Amino acid sequence: MVAISAAEAGRRQPYGTAWASHWLGAVGLLVCLHGMHCHAAVLPEERADSMYHFYDGGGVRVSGPALLVRKNVADKVSVSGSYYADTVSSASIDVVTTASPFKEKRTEYGAGIDYLYNDSLMSLSVAKSNEPDYIADTLSMNFSQDVFGGMTTVSMGYSRGKDTVLENNNASFSDYVNRYQYRLGVSQILTQTLRVSLDYEAITDEGFLNSPYRSARIFGAAVPERYPRSRDSQAVALRALKYLLPGSSVRFEYRYFWDTWDIAANTAEAAYSTYASTLWLVELRYRYYSQDNASFYSDNFTQSQNFMARDKELSTFKSHAIGGKFTYTIQNHPSFVNKSTLNVAYDHIRFKYEDFTDVRTQTPFAFNANVAQLFLSVWF
């Protein structure tokens, strides 16, 4: 998998899902950063976004295209469709020490509909992803309501996931994962230049929550991992968006995560965005993440117990990410296009694990990762 934290994933996600979600959210954020018109009771803009993404770090390479198209109907309904693909080549620390490097592909298709009624926006979406040993189906519903003249937006949401876990080269193995996610949030415009939001989410996972390929260690000997078949997690996020001089803004975010596996995690992020010229928008950002290990994690157990894990994403570790994004507004485009932009984003991430040992060197494991995205956005 792409190297993401246990708290960010909250559970196993198909390859690339974290980066896909981050990209789709970032596309919408461009509108919010410069204009401050991100009210809930407005249909999403008619647009098309195409992207090519690339991740390289820790022996894992992930790359592929993505496409999102949205069209409005009668000023009340918005329909959307999306496609996302990953080609994964993995020779990660888990793979090279317990198995052979592999290469596989994951594809995801999604569709959604939004309905606007007065100051309310109701959304329904479905997504299906496939890879050789994992199939995921997700249904999501969201509702948001503007109150107090649009100064406050209250939102809630629910997602239901049903996954099938398989094992390559073992046709007899098949298990399931059921996922339930509940969301609640409030966004408030405090001044003409300041918006803050507070969001809460709760997730319940049931089923086969570990990988059929990884092994734990007892006195250095490999044994199959064993996880609890249930996990409850919660997270609270506080965000602030401040408009500065004309064409500039700053964004801050803090998120705290905790779960029944005794993992606690902190995420802090800051970003500054400004127009370098009438055509160039530049964003610089920094992100810090830290987490404690799960109660049943150990780098090397001294005795057998009911639950045992040696997944590095359940260990104690920290990461630092620094990056930026450049957006160029294209001047010449066909008459049916209202606006188009070309976007390039890059992040460099440093992972450092405190209690996960690289068995090849017998030192704490650490690695650098690079994430690049190139995408074109067209409004029509």
Image: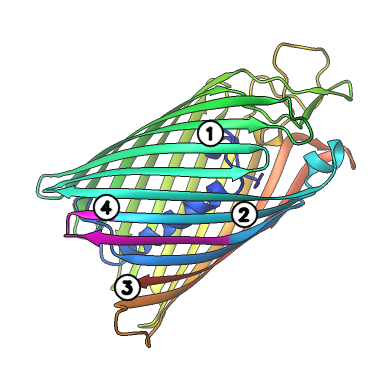
Magenta-highlighted residues: 65-78
Front residue of 221/275: it is 221
Residue 4 image position (x, y, % from top left): 61, 44
Front residue of 6/228: it is 228
SS assignment at label 1: loop
Q: Residue 235 carries which label?
A: none
Residue carrying label 2: 86
Q: In which quarter of the image is the N terminus?
A: top right
Front residue of 265/330: it is 330
For the point 57% across and 51% down, which residue is it?
107
Q: Which of marks 2 and 1 is nearer the N terminus?
A: 1
Q: Which of marks 3 and 2 is in front?
A: 2
Q: Residue 247 carries which label?
A: 3
The correct choice, above or below, for 47 with respect to 303 in the image is below
- Residue 346 seen anywhere in this rendered image of the structure: no
Amino acid beneath label 2: Asp
CA separation, marks 3 and 2? 35 Å
CA separation, marks 3 and 4? 16 Å
CA separation, marks 4 and 1? 27 Å
For the point 73% across and 20% down, which residue is it?
308
The correct choice, above or below, for 193 with respect to 109 in the image is below
Amino acid beneath label 1: Gly
CA separation, marks 2 and 1? 20 Å
For the point 59% across and 31% down, which residue is it?
164
- Report the side of 223 relative to 132 (left or right): right
> Is-magenta flag for residue 77?
yes
Q: Residues within 10 Å of mark 4 (few under 14, many from 20)?
A: many
